[in-house]
Amino acid sequence: MTEDVWWAVARSEEVTGDKPINIDIGDQPVVLWRDKDGFVRALEDRCPHRRAPLSLGCVLASGAIQCGYHGWTYDGESGRLVDIPNLKGEQKYPPIYRAVPFAVSEGGGFVRICLNAKAAAPVSPTTETLPLSGTENVSLSHEHLIAALFDDPALVIAIKGVHYTPYLMSELAEQNGKLVLERSCQWKSPHWPAPFSSDFPITLRIGTDPVTGETDLLLRDNAFNTLLSATVAPVPAARGVTQVRWRAKLGSTRPGLMAKMLGFGTPFRILPSVNGAALRTLKPSASIHAAALREEIRSHQAAAHNVAA
Amino acid sequence: MLDIKDTAPEQDFADPIAGDPRNFAAAVNNWVPHDIVLKDAWFPLAHSFAVVDKPARRSVYSQPFYLWRENGVAVAAEFHPNDTDPTDKSDFSDAAGRYPVLEHYGYVWCWFGNPANADPAHLPSIPYLPAEGNLPKHMLGTVRFDCTAPLSLENLIDLTHADFLHADVVGDEKMDKEVVEVFYDSETITMVRRCTNKSVAPIMKWFGGVKSDVQQVRQVIRIYLRSHAAIAYGRFSPGDNVQLFHPCVPETRDRTRLDYAMNTSNVKKSNLFRYLMPKASYKVSRQDSTMTSPQSPRYMNPETRKDLHSPLDEAGQKYRVLMTALAERQARGDFAYRDNVSADCSEIIGYDGK
């Protein structure tokens, strides 16, 4: 797992000072909680004493986290051990007595962490907090989930009333460091079959971070009205599962019955399970170019970094 | 099948705890309990009442044990009597596929190891269990731990965990003073914990008639290393003594069976504590598993990162070192018992027969 990558591992409302939560970045378990000042803290979800998950412990009034096994207590910012309650009296612990801390950044309704505790804060994370949100554990690996999103979004996301066609308005390409494509869509109302359609009423623009897979979705009609915008944050978790957090917002101008219907019920969902038969026979199309584009982006970034240095 | 290397004992045994502190620290930190399979030991595989004419299946490190009675006498075999096509017999049973068996303390004990070395003298001493058994069934039960047996025992011997994990049953960490002492030989380790003015165990307050807010506590955990069997003896003042036999049978390297006996016959028959305390195991064991289950895979393989320790971990550290030393000695072909596990340990645990 790349150390300097910022992963959106939780929605802001999921992290509280009441109870720590556990998330994974690949095989790295992480415990998250909010301290008494409202800051999100992240440590390795493993007590260095006897390797028990710290997420099974509790958040003390001081904002520190206490392991539920033997009570070892850690400061969230530094990971330093601050107390072993059964050792009565004031104790000082050597610096090695610490849990592994991770860097934390919060913005746009997402909590992002970086496994490198000294990493610089992420560049201008989204500031607007989109009002609709959810979390899903998808039984598909991170890599395959992103590829499916490029090749057939219907396997991984559902937008109310929207049918994704196999036809792209623009193929996968690099734009401002992201992998971007725009797919033609139809409403799920009676319509001429896509292969025989001259024009399509809506499009879905997909803009994906080449490393994290964090994706901005934009559903627009042919008058360029934004019908729905969403941010989808997939994080590789244990056993090939991908944890996906998302936030979304409906556009204020949604002309037409189907567009208006987006405002009723659940307009956006991440599908928790994938149709295996459909996935197996899905032919790679847009995703074919993803690997080369990622490499290209990486080269550009490395070159820019060298110039700056 | 498991191998038995059985050569003459080597006389190179050195106290692994009193030796070089660097070796001690290395053994503590190289703790991979899943790799430890100790042989030549009696395991209490079933409560006596559970062994009847119809065979019951048990296992030790996946080695099958079928237990039943023939003319009222408990027997154990490697194959089910109805198995008409048994696979190759291991070296753990005799020519007829039978294991050495003892019935004592209300348990059927089977020998895991070289049958020729089976000796009643290697049966652990449990002073507060009647030799003939016969405890009422409400004092007996079976629970399971989703972890390797040594982790379950390391958990038990460090009782500070109880103040956090089992606070709602046995009381929290609030007390004036805590002193831990550890005694050991090559086959056993004994931890004595004395707590001054400790918050009263809720189960004693609610059901045991203890009115006080604090109590004086002396808890003893004594582990018979090879048998993975522990006795947990607690004296509470005010309060009744707790007399638990806690055998952790390693059915596999990552799962543990506990056929426990909580002898509460010292408690008045009119006291609810007599009947409820043995049932607390159902709650306490699940609480333990919430920690030891995620712990267990994290101890399956060697790690470069060392665990951190506090002075309160002395017993657990010494347990690790003694287990490792015993495993290393067995790996060299030395299966001899150097200390007597069947000698009455009443004095060691502070049991006065009451």
Image (spheres, coloured by chain):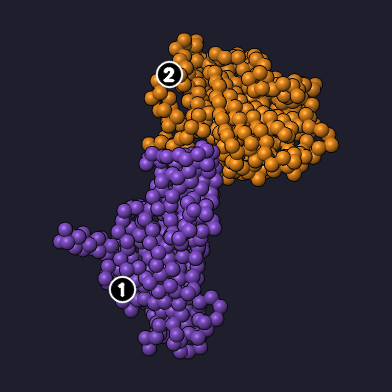
Chain colours: A purple, B orange
Which residue appears farthest toward the right when viewing the image?
B270
Callout 2: SS: loop
The one nearer the camera, B234 or A185, is: B234
Q: Residue at x 37, y 70 (%)?
A: A126
The amino acid at mark 2 is Gly
> Do pointers 2 and 1 mark residues of a single chain?
no
Q: CA distance from mark 2 to mark 1?
A: 70 Å
Q: Is residue A212 above or below residue A202?
A: above
Q: Quadrant of the C terminus of chain B?
A: top right
Q: Residue at x 61, y 33 (%)?
A: B195
The residue carrying mark 2 is B19
Residue A228 visible at all: yes
Residue A163 visible at all: no
Relative image position of residue A52 (x, y in whole percent): 50, 43
The residue carrying mark 1 is A171
The chain to which mark 2 is attached is B
Q: Residue at x 52, y 38 (%)?
A: A88
Relative image position of residue A256 (x, y in whole percent): 48, 89
